[in-house]
Image: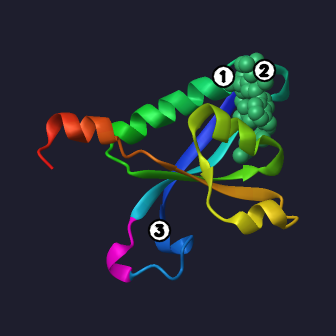
Amino acid sequence: MIGYYTLRHTALSSLLPNINPDKDKQILDIARLAIAKPFQGNGYGTEIMHTILHMAVQFNERYIVLDAIKDVWHWYKERFRFEHLFDQDLIDDTPVITLLLDLYDKELVEQYYDE
Ligand SMILES: CC(C)(COP(=O)(O)OP(=O)(O)OC[C@H]1O[C@@H](n2cnc3c(N)ncnc32)[C@H](O)[C@@H]1OP(=O)(O)O)[C@@H](O)C(=O)NCCC(=O)NCCS
C-alpha cells in the first residue's frame, strides 16, 4: 500500500466552541492522510488531496479542516491554500496545527447567481 486517507464529518462547534448554535454545521475533516516513506515525494499526496478537493466540491462542502503535523503544515498551506485556524498553534509547542480551507468560489457564484 502506497498511502491512505480517511474522511469524516465534524461539527464546526467542536473547533469553535463559542459559535452561535444556529451557525453550527458539519464540515469535512481529513482525519488521516499518509504516504508510506518509500513513496513520499512522488506526487501521491498531492494526487490524494486533489481527489479529496474534487469530492468536497461535488458534495457541496464549504470547509475542509485537518490537524497537520507541524513539520508538514506548509505543504498544505503552499499547495492547497489551507490557513491555520489558531495563532496559538504556531506559538505553542503543540505537535499539530489546525488548518482550514474555505471552498467558497466567488467567481463561480458570480457567474451563476444574481447576488
Ligand atoms: C505530507 C505527505 C502526505 C505529503 O505527501 P507526498 O506524496 O510525500 O507529497 P507530494 O509528493 O505530493 O509533494 C511533494 C512536494 O511537496 C514539497 N514538500 C514536502 N514537504 C513539504 C513541507 N513541509 N512544506 C512545503 N512543501 C513540502 C516537496 O518539496 C515536493 O515539492 P516538488 O513537487 O516541487 O518537488 C507525506 O509526506 C506524508 O505522508 N508524510 C508523513 C505523514 C504525515 O505527515 N501526514 C500528514 C499528517 S497531517
Which mark identifies residue 34? none
Kindly identify the residue that appears in the image at 66 percent across and 39 percent down. Answer: 76
User: What residue is pinned by disc 3?
Assistant: 11
Q: Earlier in the sequence, mark 2 or mark 3?
A: 3
Residue 22 colored in magenta in the image: yes
Q: Earlier in the sequence, mark 3 or mark 1?
A: 3
User: What residue is pinned by disc 2?
Assistant: 39
Left/right placement of residue 99 relative to residue 26 reads right
The x, y position of residue 101, in whole percent, is 52, 48
Q: Report the magenta stretch's main SS.
A: helix
Measured Cα–Cα span from mark 2 to mark 3: 33 Å
Q: Is mark 1 within 8 Å of ligand 1?
A: yes
Kindly identify the residue that appears in the image at 78 percent across and 49 percent down. Answer: 69
Left/right placement of residue 1 relative to residue 100 reads right
Q: Are marks 1 and 2 in contact (CB under 8 Å)?
A: yes
User: What residue is pinned by disc 1?
Assistant: 44
Q: Element at badge 3?
A: strand
Measured Cα–Cα span from mark 3 to mark 1: 29 Å
Q: Is mark 2 within 8 Å of ligand 1?
A: yes
Q: Is mark 3 within 8 Å of ligand 1?
A: no
For ligand 1, the image quadrant comes to top right
Residue 56 can be seen, yes or no: yes
